[in-house]
Image: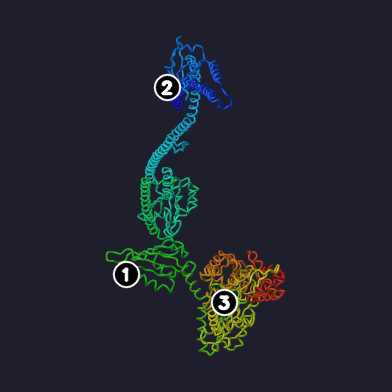
Amino acid sequence: MRLHHKLSLALLPAVLLAVVGFGAWAYAAAYEALSSRALQGVGWLAERFVEEQLAARYGGEVDALGRQMRQADALAAIAGLARSGPQRVVLLDAERRVLHASGADVAEWPARWGDLLAGTDAATGRFEEPGGRAWLYGVQRFEPWGWSVMVLEPEDDLVAAIARIRWITAWTALLTALVVVAMVLWVSREMLARPIRTLQQAAARIARDPAPVRIAIDSGDELDDLARSMEAMAAALAAEIGRREEADRQLERVKNLYAALGETNQALVRIHARGELLNALCRIAVQHGGFLLAWVGELDHATGWLVPCAVAGPAAPMVERIRVSVLGERPEGRGVTGRACRGDGWAIENDFLGNPDMAPWREAARGFGIGSAAAFGLYEEGELTGFLVVYAAEAGFFRADLVALLRSLAADISFALSALRRAEARERAEHAQRDAEERLHSALEASGDGIWELDLASGQLIATPRCLEMLGYVPGDIPTTYQAWDELLHPEDRRDTEAAIEAHVRGDSVQFVREHRLRCADGQYRWVRSAGRVMRRDADGHPLRMFGTLHDINDRKAAEERILFLGYRDVLTGLPNRVLFADRLSQALAHARRSGRRVAVMFLDLDRFKVVNDTLGHGVGDALLRAVADRLRCSVREADTVCRRGGDEFVVALQDVDEIDSVTRVAGKIRDRLGEPFELDGHTVHVGASIGVALFPDDGAEPEALIRHADTAMYAAKDAGRGTVQFFMPAMGTRAERRRRLETALRRALADGLLHLDLRAQVALADGRVVRGEALLRSDEPALAGSPAADILALADECGLADPLDDWLIASACREQRRWHRAGRPLLPVVVKLAAAHLRGQELPRRVAEALAAAQMPAECLELAFAESVVARDLDLAGANLRALRRMGVRIALDGFGSGGSSLVSLKRFPVDRLAIDASLVRDLPDDRSSAELTRAIVAMAHALQLEVVAAGVERAPQRDFLAGVGCDHAQGDGIAAACDGDAFVAWLAGRDAAGPGT
């Protein structure tokens, strides 16, 4: 029976009791109403009768309704009242006499009424008439006259009325009880059955799936308490089941790892190849340990990185996406492997995704569902050589008992690796021993050496076929005697070689070693190295047998001769180098002092060599230098010396000079020969030479002074024009003094702030747009005033002022840019030419970054230009600096292209944005055919390398038109826009903007 039914039955007696009580109350109320009915009638009649008596006595109108009532009328009214029902009404006076009675039979009743009324003002009671009929009565007394009214009611009539009331009351109570029961049933269903059904469903759900549950009962009563208790029970049950399941899983893991240990030990016994063993161990760990990934990494002690060498598991691709280090200063070295290396050789991470130290691998781990990791060091002979790293899906996977088993597994692996290392070392030693024995038994034939054995008693010498082969003989060509081999020795080497053998046989040396020559089958001599030792002696210590080797060193001797040659010769041309030239010049000067004659020193520098080298490549350039060397050799006597000092510079020493005119003729001959065209690899090349001459003893008594003065005269020849000859004059010596003055002036200008920048525009030849400005170094120092910027930069490079000067140039250019920007002008890139020394150092990128940061300007506003000869001087270091600048966003230009030094072939190695054609090449455009062709070639090759081209020194409209016609991108020069200070440059730009581009 359901709870709400039981509740209803429990409440039913209470409901019925309430109904009975209500019926009793209704019955009593009815009885009381009937009993008081007579009294109500008596009260009303008495009131009427009193009013009547008062009216009769006082004659006044005392009726509230304004009418008079006589006694007869009152009596008639009482009679009418009696006739309307079964009751009887009797009016008594003060002496209890009947004044009036309703019903004839009333008057005949005994005079009992007086007894009934005696001593009381009001009374009720019961009596029976003589006929046996029972009556109920009620008496009401009225003052001040003392009259009384009695109302009588038949008892049977009142009982019948009460029975009718009881029947009505019973049915009313029954209906009320039914309604109450129905309400109780509804309330019990709503307030009890539904929460209980919810509790039943929750209990069933907990039975199916013991997990924390929320029961939707919030009544605040005992059922709510029961629901909360069931929720707590479900949570506790789920936790207990979870603990048991986790214990089961942990037990399963431990069991699997024990299985892994067993299979690992089998693998250690069965597998002897290192790579195969490590892969098998990773596979076993994944298969039995339930890991997503297991891998072994070898530790690179030099770099601190881990190099994977074995991997297994579903997450194996993750190894290719991560890097692991053991160095704590790296983010990749703060994981479990790094902690294991810096700690006790093992480490775990049970919250892989939550630990900030795992950030380098978090995304990869999340992609493969990894929640925890552990690393265990692998040791070989006590040396940490690698790590076993395992990953699990669950966070908190690595508990103490599991870690202990994994440490045991790592120890087993370390033991196996140590055994393998020992086995490998033993195998290597055995192999080395076998190799030594084989080399010994094969008489070094594998290395190309020959073996010989000499019987000192008989003089018999037995040589291996290799000894004969290296000399071009076949077996039988040489008798097997010591004398026969001794006759093959070079006459110059025979005595020393025989003496060395005799000394060793006497015991004067531990071993016989000698380099000498032997005659070959073709009659030529070949260098060999003979080494031997007495291997057997008799009882008295006398030598019996000598064992030795014969090693071919002919190639080494040739190389040594080559090295000796290179020590005194130029590799490319074969001409004497500086060392040999200085020696021969010293000998010529010594001879001249004895003979009283002169010696002439000529210093030559090729014109346009750099252009040829740049446009046609180093191969053609080298061929040109060799051809120049040949023409120089043919232009002088055999006693004279021609030297290549480096690059495109040559020096010639003429001995026994009688007249200066002969020197002039030789210099003119050299100039003319070098001015003739060269046919090289299908190219016709035109170059020239500027020649400076110094004479002994007129211009110097020592080789260094003569060479220096000839160099000074050569620069004077270049200044005088291409293809000229200049003899040294003392006035030329002032050039060195001028350089010293310029250095002093430059230092003073840097210290006193006497430097400033002028700016010159570079425009696009296609549409006349101003694309950038070029910063030109100027000085207010008188000694530097008017000096070209390139000369000042070269001077700074020579005297060690490149760093402060370049820093000033970059900072000044950035300040100009910032000033334009604050004035509202758009940023215009500025080209800054730097000295050579910066590219030979490693601080240039840092210095540029600091200057840009100080000026708060972007890198795109700056372009750095370097002479191409500077870039070519140290390709590796220059390339590294240029790439670093390019990564910062700074654009790079090669300045002075076409004046010598490198080639376009090497430009593909550098991040260069544009080439600046040197003004010396632009100067003769478009009339000079060679200059025009070279310019066209430079533009075409630069565009092929995706480089822009800017032409410098454009002064005339024909030059500009030619350059535009050959596709040159940009141009600068006085014919475009003259250089001016910063304010004038801004004003010029503003005027150009107002007039429109192209003006």
Sooner in the amino-acid sequence: mark 3 or mark 1: 1
In this picture, is 835 found above or below 434? below
Q: Position of residue 948 (x, y in %)?
A: 64, 67
Q: Given this view, does label 1 or label 2 mark the residue nearer the observer?
A: 2
Gap in Å between the C-alphas at discs 2 and 3? 152 Å
Q: Residue furthest front?
A: 58
Amino acid type at circle 1 is: Gly
Name of the residue lying farthest toward the bottom? 596
Residue 442 on image: x %, y %: 40, 58
Residue to which mark 1 is pinned: 507
Secondary element at image label 1: loop
Depth-wise, is mark 2 or mark 3 nearer the camera?
Answer: 2
Residue position for label 3: 793
Question: Is disc 2 surrounded by few (<14), some (14 to 19) or many (20+) residues within 10 Å?
Answer: few
Q: Residue furthest top?
A: 131
Dot 2 lies on which element?
loop
From the viewer's perspective, is residue 801 above or below residue 527? below
Q: CA distance from mark 3 to mark 1?
A: 70 Å
The residue indicated by pointer 2 is 120
Give the quadrant of the N terminus. top left
Residue 861 sits in quarter:
bottom right
Of the pair 177 and 295, the residue shown nearer to us: 177
Task: Identify the image quadrant of residue 633.
Answer: bottom right
Q: Amino acid at mark 3?
A: Leu
Query: Which disc number belongs to residue 366?
Result: none
Can residue 622 be seen here? The reply is no
